[in-house]
Image: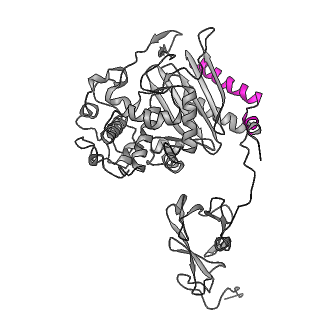
Amino acid sequence: MTTPQEEQEENALLPATRRALLHRIAVAQADGRAPSLTAAVVRGGELVWSGSRTSVDGHAPDGDVQYRIGSITKTFVAVLVLRLRDEGRLSLEDPLDKHLPGTPAGQATIAQLLAHSAGLAAETPGPWWERTPGALRPELADVLGENPVLHPGGRRFHYSNPGFALLGALVEELRREPWDQVLRREVLEPLGLHRTGTDPVAPAAGGWAVHPWADVLLPEQVEELGRMAPAGQLWSTTADLARFAVFLMRGDDRVLSADSVAEMRAPAAPPEPGDLAAGSGYGLGLQIQHWGTRRLVGHSGSVPGFLANLSVGVEDDVAAVVLANCTSSAPFWSVGPDLVRIVAEAEPRIPEPWRPLPEVDQEVLALTGPWYWGTQAYLLRLLPDGGVSLDPVGASGRRSRFRAAGDGTWTGLEGYYAGEILRAVRRPDGTVSHLDLGSFFFTRTPYDPAAPVPGGVDEGGWRGLRQGT
């Protein structure tokens, strides 16, 4: 067993890693010509590094300085919607009209809105909504326009800012109070995100536009976004978003369970061909990206004067937050993934010590070992959480983990067998005849004649092939 002090020492980054992180953000701030850039890294559920670069002598932002985080706001709104689902107030398959009637997007399901697959327009009608007052769009009709549906629902991923304005209005309709007040009570306060909110509270960075061909600045106005606020209004800090990253990896039963957060991280929208080639997708309020062999979830944010990125590597247990106060910066979007990569590659995650199970179900233990689907060999393993895994012997074949359902069956969690039921079929004497997985029979020997193999087994059994026959 490790002590708390030993765990803290294990989690501390090596000097070389810390310098590599500082070098990466220094290059990003210099090459991207950002007035300031601040970043933080989380590992093992703790903030292990933070750094910043600035164009102002003698001043550098720390983890308490607020920046506008743009579309990362959408992930917070998605958490509120999933909370309503977990309370039984709605189903993700409900059409919006069931809970928020009277909009031209009423046939879109809540899941489609969360995953940007409802087919809605990307932006509002009228002038650029991020640079004009929300008072210009006082009603949802002003946000959507007369014909907001551009594509059939559920058929393609098409990012929609108005779609999250609808989700914010849905939260307000069911909670009977403003969405940002609900957010503070149900998410921000329980998670300790005291420096996150819809309005800046000093110290807060000012937003700037940097001239594309000269090293000069132009102040960006900060607008109150009104109905569009759920799409990009929030301000936050690297310290707060670091805590939020831990929540997105592990869940928190005061806000959302680990299972519900994992559901947010799973792909939920059909990707466009370009996105598929680039290895990107979208879950329920979360972007999904593949950078090399590494899978990251999180979200980016961009509003005039500010850029933000939250990149979470669940498998590596490493996350990064990067915030800058400029309207655009060419190398910005790779900084967060690079910070995760630097830590994960320089200091790979140390696994937990192996420990035997405290107890075991002997009937389940007897099922472990080799099974055959026809002639394809598989191994059934008992997992520490009481579930099982079924893996092909060799590189090819369908594999999945299964969660115990409590009635002697298991439910598939991934891949081809996601949602399928695995059960052991027993003979009248109690011995196991075979495993049934979605109508596929797995037997202890290839085409076991003692099991009811579909199509039967030739009575002559296995044989060689005589010369000339």
Q: Is residue 198 magenta?
A: no
Of 407 and 26, nearer the camera is 407
Q: Residue placed at 39% from the left, 32% from the top?
A: 181
Left or right of 309? Residue 156 is left
- The colour scheme is one colour
Place residue 366 in its image quadrant.
Answer: bottom right
Q: Position of residue 424 (x, y in %)?
A: 57, 75
Looking at the image, residue 70 lies above or below residue 383: above
Taking the image as shown, residue 135 lies to the left or right of residue 416, namely: left
Q: Residue 42 location in percent, x, y?
A: 63, 34
Whether residue 283 appears in this view of the structure is yes
Eyeballing the image, is 347 above or below 133?
below
Assign the magenta stretch its main secondary structure: helix
Residue 207 location, x and y as percent? Answer: 47, 16
> Where the C terminus falls, by quadrant?
bottom right
Tell me the residue at 65%/35% (across/down): 46
The x, y position of residue 165, in whole percent, is: 34, 35
| Up/down of 13 relative to 457, above or below | above
Which residue is at the front of the view, 187 or 209?
187
Say if residue 74 shows up in the picture: no
Q: Which residues are magenta?
A: 7-33
Asked if the stretch drawn in magenta spans residue 9, the answer is: yes
